[in-house]
Structure formats: structure tokens, C-alpha cells
Image (cartoon, helix red, strand yellow):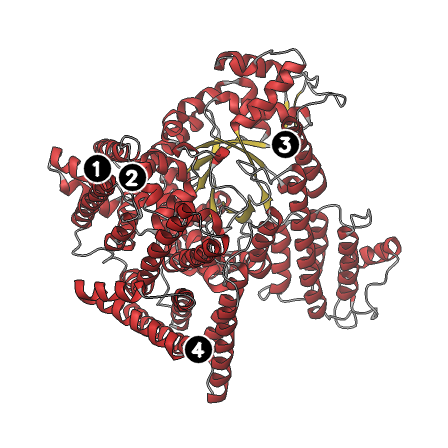
Amino acid sequence: MEVKTDEKSTISLRRDVEYLNKILDKVLYHEGGEELLEKVNKIRSLTTSLRDAQDPSIYMQIKEEIDQLQPPLRENVIRAFSVNLHLFNIAEQNYRVRRRREYQAQDDTIIQPGSLEDGAKRLFENNVSPEQIGELLEQLSLELVITAHPTEATRRTMLRIHQRVASLLKAWDHSYTRYAKKVIQETIENEITILWQSSEIREKKPSVMKEVSNGLYFFDKVLFDVLPRLHQDLEDLLYEKYNQQWHVPSFLRFGSWIGGDRDGNPNVTANTTLQTLKEHRALVLSKYKDSLDRLKELLSQSTKKVAVSEEIEDSIQQERKTLNYNGWHKEDEVYRIKLGLMLRKLEYTEQEHELGYQNAEALLNDLYMIQNSLEQHHPNKTPIKLLRKVIRQVNVFGFHLATLDIRNHSGEHETALAEILRDVNIAPDYKALDEEGKLDVLIKVLEDPRPLISIYDEFSAETQEMINTFRMIKEVKDTFGERAIEVYLISMTASVSDLLEVLVFAKEVGLYRVYPDGHVKSRLHVAPLLETIDDLKHGPDMIKHLFSIPLYRRHLQARGDLQEIMLGYSDSSKDGGTLTANWELYQAQEEIHSIASSFNVKLKYFHGRGGSLGRGGGPLNTSLLSQPPITLGDGVKITEQGEVLSSRYLLTDIAYRSLEQATTTMMTAIAGLNDATKQVDIPSQTERQAMGKISDYALEKYQSLVFQDDGFLKYFNQATPLNELGALNIGSRPMKRKGSDRFEDLRAIPWVFAWTQSRQLLPAWFAAGTGFYKFIEETGDLALLQELYQKWPFFQSTINNLQMALTKADLTTAKEYTKMVEDTAIQTRIYDQIVEEYNLTKAMVLKIAQQEELMEHKPNIKESVRLRNPLVDPLNLIQVNLISQLRKENENGSDHEVLNSLLTEVLLTINGVAAGLRNTG
């Protein structure tokens, strides 16, 4: 039955693609006439034939067609293929929504895998007791953190059009009359026409506050309603299975970095962060007003019909006097009177007036008051879901909407603190001290209740900004609540002193203090970010040293014995290759977790994953499964960034599906750990040693190319559109740290984005094949790796991500990019290495997975890539032509208009390829 459901959805996917393509053809004809439509259809037909036949003569025909393209037709052809890919994405999203709907339409014996219903069923059928369910719910904690990392190439204006087309496509599924279908088709045609007539390219980089606005869009349109619904559904499904009512804690929350992440972004200041949180607060208060208005419309019960609580009546009497406001004109409709008064208090809250709610808990208390009163006269078995939803919204979002993390580079803290310590004559040259000397200074400063900084002191602008940032954090926590800012993240943490330096700044503004009796007050988590391979290897020793310091241990006690640790997938992968990075991340988590347990400290790991496979990307639920199971019980944080936000959270149904899969994964994983009768597949020492050898071989291969080949950087710069990406204006943050051209200072996002555009996708797979091959060659134990693929989620996820990367890579297309490398010796040497390693990796992956072809385990994804390729290929070939021309014109000093025109077309191709390959950076 499940297969039939999938087949039915797949057929409807193809139908949607054809339907949208026909409408697009009408728009193309209207906008560009017969010439444009014929050219697009001819190229599309040729690229489809090439993918089916692999005939070199067809390839030459395609190149000839593309070489002959001239403005303005060329730009229209680029845009046609880009729009085609965006429409394909919309059709695929509708396919996912439809599949979920079809499962729900079946009888209750057919349940969609990974759904909340599936999770509750599995818990019940595996005899997880009610007591264990209670413990599980207390452990369940997932926080998803949206970031402004620049990988979303599509403007929000375009995304809104995509959202409208998706809604229309969904409506088309449910329309039953010819007239309704006709109106929907006309509306879709209008939307696609508007899409065509709108500018795809940002003319300037977005400001930080624009990025804040873009992030808040997902809260406003989707997350504010989806999160409470998911919590309610879990409560209801557990009740259905166990006939027992649990209050599910608010385990699923969203945080943000946008407006708080100042690592390498000079545009984020203390004032920017404060303004960001004011925007958060303004939106959430506005949403609460809307929610209370809907409740006011619903709760029309009259005291002539029901008896309400004395508490409600007393509060109304008191607040009418305090607020000098009646709330509602009908005296018998008590809930409407109360809600009217609550709305008035929210208005005062917006104005920061003393008559407003002082905190979210006060608003919650009023909502609970209404709920308790309703329980006196309303059937308990059918609670008013809207009221439950509003209570959950306030519980989840508070008055801050999303917890804002603050992040800065360890070197910034050291430099600022060195200036302060020099000025107060504690350490003339703090930066020159060794680690032991720094710790001695820092501990003495932290134990001394006297402040270092006087209001009369004057510092450099950078140091003053650092001080202002910590003062702002205290102001925000005092004004908006403790949850508004909870964590301070330290990029490039290499030593214990990096963490204690942050505590010193916290002490200076009153966020941290050691009292004479030794007890500590601390209002801020301090979290290291382990980013490089070396950081991951040395991380456990650093954490052990940190926890051994009595002063820091008391800080942790004040923070509930919880330590947050962030793991960087981007820089570790750039540093050592994806396979080695993932293994080092896995080992570091296990080792640090063991150390923390010995100190009775709980750990929350924060996974800094990107959207791309080369930066730890992949489905949210499989990302969770690939972690050491023992690390899930203390809570998990994961970044959601760039194009992942729109692909997961632009549509309500898709957002719900992604989040329910993640929830079910965590629930069942934690239940497996807590059930002594169930064995979790944990790799043996022999299997770990095998993975270690594979990793070592892969690291050696990766670094021999990336760090030891003198021509590699030249190849990378010239055989990818790296230098052109900077003009895309997709983020407020610079592409490079310190503005240098050193490989170490290149951010991981453009590193991955550039390789993806050129279809080489090198960061996502390179060197893995050598690792597997050398291990098998040495041991002859292919069977061990095949067994690991079957039983170990981490290894399975690694192999499956490699399959995805190899499927999306296309070395025939990539070879066109290599022609832009000026030194033919470098071009040939490095491209040949890439081809050889690609073929080896593919062969090894197929042997380990025991498959004939890549992605056999996910035929729907395999088919998606197959259908997309003929649309992406022309964009790649046009991009190579344009970049070659642009670079030549730049060398010749051509006038600005010519260069700008070529660059615009290059950026259009980048947008199109990004839409086609999806997980770009």
C-alpha cells in the first residue's frame, strides 16, 4: 500500500511539472516571442537527449547553440532555465505535501514513516512504559538556530512568489470544477509573469536589519503556528496510545544568530543587536494581539449560562480600575471582558509602560486563569484548542520570540582585554603570556569583586564596543527576559583562557560575580566553538582542564550544571575533508561527553551545520541520527541557514513534516537509550580503529591536494566562479576574514558555493574513496564496511551523503570550467586527480552499499536529480562562457557598462544553478 501511495504521488509530481512547464511556455512566448520559446525548447530537448544517450555529437550541438547566444536573447534564455528550475522546486514541495496528505487519508494501519504518529506507535509497540515516557519528555530538547550565513541566492520577493504559486498548486489539487481550475491556472500564469518581470539580483548587500527582517518572516508566516501545533499533536497522539495525559514541555524552540553574530561582520554592533531584539519583541507582541483577538471572538460564553471562576471576576474588577478601561461592552461575556483588558495591557507592553505586562509569565498567568475557569464548565475531553495554542505560543516564544546567540572571535576578546589589563596595570602585555600565565591573571581578576573598568576610563573604539556589547546583554536580559540572550559563543576557541576572558567581561557588567562566601552568580552560558581538525583533537583535553578549575565549575553550577559546546562542520571540513571532519566530530563528541559525565556536567552540543553536504548538510532527522546516541539526551542545537530556511520553512506543511521527523528521531533514539532491554548499535573497538584508519588515509589524500599542491589555489580561483560570487550580494558579511587572499581566511561558505557551482562539489566527497580503498587494500575487509553500513547510523549517513554528492557532481560539465585555468599543466594535473578520485570514491561507495547505481536507496531523489540535470546543464555552460568573457574584458580594461552587463548575466546563472542544485552552501 505504501508503494502505491508513493507511485501515485510520483505520477502527480510529473503531472505538476508538465502543468507548470506549459504555463511557463505561454509566459516565455508572451515575453520573448517565438524566438525565445524555440531556443529554450531546443536547448532543453538537446540536454535531455544528451543525458539519455551520452552522445558527443549532441554535446557539440548544445555548445554550438550556447556559443551563438547573444544579448538580449542570452539573458532571457538564462532566466527561462532559472525560472523553470524554481517551478520544479515548487512542484517537488507540493509533491511532499501531497504524499503526507495521502498517508493521512489512509486508514490508521498505514502511517507515514517518521511522523509523530509513527513515533508514538513505535514507543507503544516497543513497550516503553508511561514512566519512561515522562522521563523521555523531560530529556527531549531541540533548538534550531537560524543564521544569516549567505547561501540563499534567491531574493525574498521571489520566495514570496514561490510561496503563492505553491499555495495555488495545492488549491488546484482540491478544485473540482472547470471554472475553479481555470481561475487557478490564470492566477499561476499571472504569478509566473510577475516572477519573470521582477529583478532576481540584489543591487546591494542586505543590511543586518534587512537580514533580521528576512529571518522574522519565517516566524511570522510559519513557525509561530507550526511549533504550538506540533506540541499539541504530540500530546494528543501519546494520549491516544497510552490513554494517559502528559503535559509535553516546550521542547522545540527556535533561536537566531541574525543581529547577534559579530564574528567577522563589522556591521553587527551592540546597538544593532539591541535593535534586533526590539524587532523580535515588536513582532511577538503583535502576534499575541492577533491571537487574543481570535480568542475574544471565540469565547462568547455568558454568565447567564455558565459559572466562571471568582479569580476571573476579581481580576476584571481590579484591572478595570488600574487600566481605567472596560474591555468589552457586554457585562455577561466575562471572557471577552478579560481578553479586552489583556489586549489593553499588551498595548501598554508595546509602549514599555508600567501598566503593561512586565514579563511573559504574567501573560501566561492570565491565560491559565481563563483555562482554569473554562475547565469548570467545558468538557475536559474536548479542550479549546485555540486557547491551548495561545498558551503554548507564549510558553515557546515569550516576549523575545527567539533566543539570540552572541558570537565573536576569541582574538577579539583577547585584544580588548589586553588593553584593559594594561591600562589598570595588571598585565603590561597580557597577549605575550603563556596559557598558564593568562589563567593565573584571569582567575585572580574573576575572584576579585572589584571592577576593572571605571566609567571614566577611555579605550580604543574596538575595546569600547566590546564593553558596550556586554552592557547591552545585561540590559536586554533585564528588559526582555533571561531567555532573550542565553549563550555567548567563542569562535576559534583554542584554550581555556578563551572562555575565561568572556567571563571577565561578563563580570565587569554584572552578569557574573563571585561572592565572599564562594558562591557564584552567572547569567550567561559561555560556549566554545571547536572548528578546525586540531581544535577537535585537542578539544577534550581543553574541556577537562576547564572543568577542573573550581571557579569555572561553580559557574556551571550556577548555570544548572549545563555546558554548551558548538561544533563547526564548515571549517573542519575545509581543513581536513568531509570524511575526516565527520569522524573527528563524532569522536570529539563521545570523548567530551565522557569527560563531562565524570564531572556530573550535562552537555548540549550545538551543531554548526550548513545546507550543503560539504558543510554537514542533509535532512534534519538523518543529521540527528548520525550523532553518537548518548549525546542526544541533554538537548541538541542545530543551525538552519541560507537556502535551508526557505526549503524547510517557507511552507507550513513542509515545516511541520521536517520538524515532526526530527522530533520522532530524537524521541525514539532517547527511548532506545533508556530501555535496558534494547541494544543500541555502538561500534566496537575494531570498527572504530577501522574508521580511524580510513580517516587518516583520507586526510593524507585531501591535504596532499589542498595544502601541498602549489597550483591548487590557482586552480580553485580560476576553475570556479569564486571571485564572481562576491558580487551576488547575498549577505552582509564579507566572504573572507580580514579581507586577505589566504586560504585560511576564506570562509567555508564561498569555498563550498564555488565548488558546487562548477559541479565539482569537491568538499563533499574528495578523498573518501582513497580512505576506503587503502583500508580495503591493507586489510581485505570489505565485509566489515558493508556491515557497518547496515548497522551504524553514522557510517550509513556518511556513505549516503557521499552518494548524494557524487550524484550531483558532473565532471563533464566541470571540465568546461577547467578551461578557464590559465596554466594548462595545473589544469590537467588537478582535474585528472579529481576525476581519478571521483571514480574511485564512486566505486568504493557502491561496493560498500552493495548497489549497482548511486542513490538506489532513494529513488525519488535520484529521479529528481535526473530531471533537474537537463535544466542545470545549459546554465553551467553559459556561465563558463560568460565568466571567460568577463575576465578577458576585465584584463582589457573594458568600460563599466560592458563589464556590468556581463556580470549581471553571470549572477543570473549562479542563481539558476543554485536553484537547480538546492544545497549550495
Q: Residue at x 54, y 49 (%)?
A: 254
Mark 1 vs mark 3: in front:
1
SS type, badge 4 = helix
| Residue in the foreground of this view, choosing between 359 and 129 | 359
Quadrant holding the N terminus: bottom left
Q: Earlier in the sequence, mark 1 or mark 3?
A: 3
User: Residue 771 — which label?
Assistant: 1
Mark-to-mark CA distance, 1 and 3: 46 Å
Q: Residue at x 57, y 37 (%)?
A: 262
Residue that mark 2 sits on? 579
The location of residue 36, given as percent across then percent down, is 38, 74
Mark-to-mark CA distance, 4 and 2: 43 Å
Q: Earlier in the sequence, mark 2 or mark 3?
A: 3
Instruction: For residue 363, say whether it is visible.
Output: yes
What type is the residue that disc 3 sits on?
Answer: Arg
Q: Earlier in the sequence, mark 1 or mark 2?
A: 2
The location of residue 288, given as percent across then percent down, is 68, 58
Q: Residue 375's image quarter?
A: bottom right
Where 6 sits versus 889, above or below? below
Q: Earlier in the sequence, mark 4 or mark 1?
A: 4
Left or right of residue 517: residue 139: left
The location of residue 330, given as percent across then percent down, is 82, 71
What type is the residue that disc 4 sits on?
Answer: Asp
Q: Residue 6's image quarter?
A: bottom left
Left or right of residue 187: residue 593: left
Q: Earlier in the sequence, mark 4 or mark 2?
A: 4
